[in-house]
Image (cartoon, grey):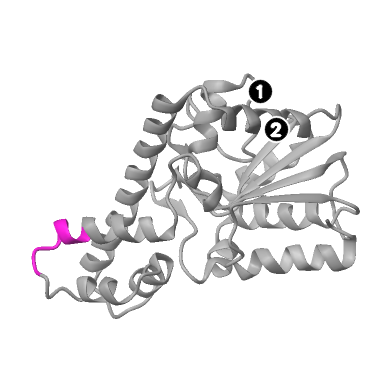
């Protein structure tokens, strides 16, 4: 049962990697290729266990799980792999910027604008835009093309939506989320974190791998966002528009399935 006590739009949006693929974003196979290419450049020997591993496994999230979260690889190897993943996100962001610069104005961008404005055309109701994406396509879109700015609950943003942002501590999060109904109308919730999100120790905040649920449970902002996802979807008679999500995340699928069965989610 939902604990939300403020008006929420009937329409909810959830996007995955396929959403920004239409605008120059990467799918999993391209992320793998960028990670592979960077590893080849930063590791001197082809006998490296990482090079052998990546040539046998083409799921970059499975690779991340095996390298970063297990003990058989050295700290240097983990660092090399992590830097290669971050490099892939750097390249992804450059591709998105280039796409904006070469394709604006676009009918597809105007269509997205129309979609969001229609979702927001309910005075007094909060609109929730959930995403599994970790790129900055939407942030750059809002900065460049639409006056209405989304709310990133709990996140300390820089002067621009695509500056480095700091995720809050548990205490900071509780304070900021206590008045969520006062923050704005459109909430953009990055369930798996984001490129350029950091914690107070400057560690990257990205949920990657095959143990996403475990990672969510230990980081306050992700745990709160996932609970918000469950709360919004357990409101009665909601309509969920899903764009570009391949249904590979069991924790997300379970919430959707339960909301369909119990709360008549469409």
Q: How many marks?
A: 2
Image position of 20 with respect to 162: above or below: below
Q: Position of residue 46 (x, y in %)?
A: 11, 71
Residue 44 numbered mark, or none: none
Which residue reaches farthest left? 44
Image position of 38 with respect to 188: above or below: below
Front position among marks 2 and 1: 2
Magenta-drawn stretch contains 111: no
Q: Which residue is mark 1?
A: 148
Q: Quadrant of residue 95?
A: top left
Label 2: few (<14), some or many (≥20) within 10 Å?
some
Q: Position of residue 79 (x, y in %)?
A: 26, 61
Quarter holding the C terminus is bottom right
Q: Residue at (34%, 61%) from the top-left corner?
A: 32
Residue 116 numbered mark, or none: 2
Image position of 104 with respect to 136: above or below: above
State how far apart marks 2 and 1 are (Cα): 10 Å
Q: Position of residue 49 (x, y in %)?
A: 20, 76
Q: Are marks 2 and 1 in contact (CB under 8 Å)?
A: yes
């Amino acid at each position: 049962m939902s604990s939300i006590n403020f008006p929420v739009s009937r329409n909810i949006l959830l996007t995955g990697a396929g959403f920004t693929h239409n605008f120059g974003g990467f799918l999993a196979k391209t992320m793998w290729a960028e990670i592979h290419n960077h590893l080849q450049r930063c590791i001197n020997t082809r006998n490296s266990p990482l090079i052998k591993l990546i040539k046998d496994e083409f799921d970059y999230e499975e690779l991340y799980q095996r390298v970063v979260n297990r003990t058989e690889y050295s700290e240097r190897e983990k660092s090399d792999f992590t830097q290669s993943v971050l490099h892939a996100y750097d390249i992804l962001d450059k591709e998105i910027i280039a796409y904006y610069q070469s394709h604006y104005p676009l009918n597809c961008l105007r269509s997205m604008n129309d979609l969001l404005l229609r979702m927001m055309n309910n005075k007094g109701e909060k609109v929730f835009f959930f995403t599994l994406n970790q790129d900055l396509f939407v942030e750059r879109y809002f900065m460049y093309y639409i006056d209405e700015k989304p709310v990133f609950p709990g996140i300390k943003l820089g002067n621009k939506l695509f500056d480095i942002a700091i995720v809050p501590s548990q205490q900071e999060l509780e304070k900021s989320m206590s008045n969520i109904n006062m923050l704005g109308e459109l909430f953009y919730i990055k369930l798996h974190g984001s490129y350029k999100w950091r914690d107070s120790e400057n560690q990257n905040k990205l949920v990657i791998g095959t143990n996403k649920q475990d990672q969510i449970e230990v980081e306050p902002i992700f745990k709160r966002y996932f609970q918000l996802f469950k709360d919004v979807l357990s409101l009665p008679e909601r309509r969920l528009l899903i764009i570009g999500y391949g249904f590979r995340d069991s924790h997300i699928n379970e919430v959707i399935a339960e909301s369909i069965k119990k709360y008549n989610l469409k």
